Image (cartoon, rainbow, N blue to C red):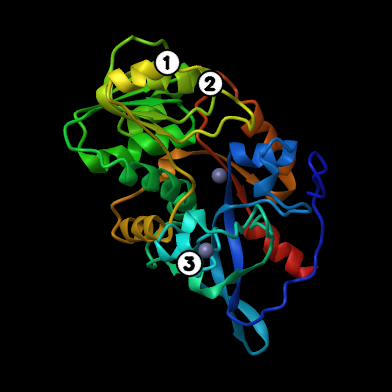
Amino acid sequence: MHSPGVVGLEELAVPTVGDGHVLVRPIANGLCGTDLELIDGTIDEAYVRYPLTLGHEWVGRRCVQMNGELTDGELVVVEGIIPCGLCEQCQRGATNRCAIYDEIGFTRPGAIATYILVPEHLVHALSGDVAPRDAVLTEPMAVVWRALRRASISPGTRCLVVGDGTVGLLCAYLLQRFNPKSITMLGVRPAQAELAQHAGVTEFVTSPSGERYDVVVEAAGQKAAVEYAVSSADRGGIVVLLGLPAHGTTIEVAPDDIVNNDLTIQGSFSYTRTSWREIVELLNEKVLRPSFLITHEFTLDQWVDAIATLRTPDETQPRGKVLVMLDEVSSEVTRR
Ligand SMILES: [Zn+2]
Ligand SMILES: [Zn+2]
């Protein structure tokens, strides 16, 4: 992507391996709404640097040099946020808030590529029996996990997830780890009900009920959804804002309700090194198997269709994670 809207497929040189960096061959990339914001140029410009190669939700194989040839090594996921490790925020463990924002797929080349160069200390190996289609969801799971862990959710709570997209579905899936009493999902597409059930949703609704909940997670990233989330929290409730409305969006809330209802409203940005590591551990222990959320797979040369599917879902079909697969494509490119 040379600038917003200028997207294409280009042949670039294989990155040169330098100090503390390793070469990884991506196998699959998930696309998400943030990729659309990068393409459209609607993302806050503090979080992007063009020209840019897309791809921040991915799994790959570490490249190993053998007799001068690159061959596939172990299956890995790589933390995308590159913390400086020295600033006050990093020292506190809040690596998501590092003073120097630097992230794969945003300020440095992403993984929708044949090869990617990554800092070695951010590479996490997966055990041999973890499926790449489960591991490709590490990044969005780490984002959701960080938000839920931060909210200190007690067991037995009544939860509401606003939004039926992949973040909402992953949210329901990971909320189960907190032993909630129930998980209601307020969606807009009835076709998502089946995926929601798979994700552990106990009740899928498409119109607001007026009921109130102990934990409300906003995962739609829309003005009305944020406003509804805040108004749906029971007294003493926690509202977690996970969706990312377009930069510049404002909401209307009644502050006296926030005070009177003793609410906690919590934002959460991306993931920390800790939340990423915990998700990798849960994948390696086979506790997490989120691949049921993958509904669409495209090859690299079908990237236009992949983006179109993400942008305009077919309302009659369930749509979970959209993947761009690089496996076959990359071996072809190497031969050429
Ligand atoms: Zn994403
Ligand atoms: Zn830092």
Q: Residues within 10 Å of mark 1 (few under 14, many from 20)?
A: few
Secondary structure under tag 1 reads: loop
Q: Hey, which quadrant is residue 45 in on the image?
A: top right
Using the image, determine if residue 97 lies above or below residue 160.
Answer: below
Name the kind of residue labelled 2 in the image.
Answer: Ile
Say which of 7 and 265 sits in front: 265
Residue for badge 2: 251
Which residue is outermost to the left? 156
Secondary structure under tag 2 reads: loop
Asked whether the beta carbons under mark 3 and mark 1 sit within 8 Å of each other, the answer is no
Residue for badge 3: 75
Quadrant holding the C terminus: bottom right
Residue found at x 47% / y 49%: 137
Residue for badge 1: 254
Q: Earlier in the sequence, mark 3 or mark 2?
A: 3
Distance from label 3 to label 1 (Cα)?
A: 49 Å
Q: Is residue 138 left or right of residue 309?
A: left
Res. 46 visible in picture = yes
Report x, y in % for residue 48.
Answer: 69, 49
Using the image, determine if residue 67 lies above or below residue 177.
Answer: below
Report x, y in % for residue 194.
Answer: 39, 26
Name the kind of residue labelled 1 in the image.
Answer: Ala
Point out the frontmost of discs 3 and 1. Answer: 1
